[in-house]
Image: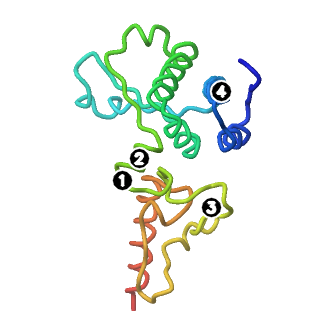
Amino acid sequence: MGSLRITGLETLKSAYRNLSGPNQADWKKSVLYYLEGFVRYNTLEISIPVLRDPALAPEGHTGLICSILLDYELCRMVKEAGWFDEFRLRLEDLLLDVMEAKLYPDLKEHLVDRFSITPLSIEQEVGSSGGAITGWSFEEGPPPVVHEMGRIGSAVHTPAPGVFQAGQWTYSPSGVPIALLTGKLAADAIKKDLRP
């Protein structure tokens, strides 16, 4: 691996900022080494949409959506270094390896197609800052919305009298279930507000 064997994300990013000449190959090896541990020891979220709606795949087939939280800045650095496609494909391979070893034996043997979406593709497609899917970072202090479970009912209130809010950005953690829940809470608050 040469003189550089980095295992921590922040150390990898710091090393990239100080790259020059021959160290670039070592940095790439270190990123790939980091990626293996990142996938092997991380938490994956796996969705199988066809379980709810069989029409989402041809008969006898299914789709798997495997989600993992990936650092935007590392992706950007790899892209700047000129080997992002290799990085993305290696990440896909590692995810398939983990799923096959732990959950779905012979998964790769039955694979018809695959693709991936990264923070860079999300940023490009929807224009979110840093490829965010949530709207805020969990690393920069508390989110700018209600984020305590006991206060979720207050998330629908705004400073303007008679104006309520709902949706996935109303409460943290955000998402579709929060959009539905805050929609119901906002509707209840409006009904209560309209009573004489």
Q: Position of residue 124 (x, y in %)?
A: 38, 49
Q: Is residue 193 above or below residue 21?
A: below
Instruction: Say which mark, if any, is on residue 136.
Output: none
Camera-nearest label, 2 or 3: 2
Furthest toward the bottom, the residue is: 196
Q: Quadrant of the N terminus?
A: top right
**Mark 2 Cα shell of 10 Å, populated few (<14), some (14-19), many (≥20):** some
Q: Which residue was labeled with disc 2?
A: 122
Figure colour scheme = rainbow
Q: Are marks 4 and 3 in contact (CB under 8 Å)?
A: no
Camera-nearest label, 1 or 3: 1
Judging from the image, what secondary structure is the residue with disc 3 in?
helix
**Distance from label 4 to label 1 (Cα)?**
36 Å
Q: Are marks 1 and 2 in contact (CB under 8 Å)?
A: yes
**Residue at the image position 39 percent from the left and 87 percent from the top:** 195
Q: What amino acid is labelled 3 in the image? A: Met
Judging from the image, what secondary structure is the residue with disc 2 in?
helix
Q: What amino acid is labelled 4 in the image? A: Pro
Q: Is residue 90 above or below residue 75?
A: above
**Mark closer to the chain start, 1 or 3:** 1
| Quarter-of-image position of residue 112 | top left
**Distance from label 1 to label 3 (Cα)?**
29 Å
**Residue at the image position 29 percent from the left and 18 percent from the top:** 61
Instruction: Say which mark, if any, is on residue 22.
Output: 4
**Mark 4 Cα shell of 10 Å, populated few (<14), some (14-19), many (≥20):** few
Instruction: Say which mark, if any, is on residue 149.
Output: 3
Front residue of this view, candidates 83 and 47: 83
Counting labels gives: 4
Q: Which residue was labeled with disc 1?
A: 126
Q: What amino acid is labelled 1 in the image? A: Val
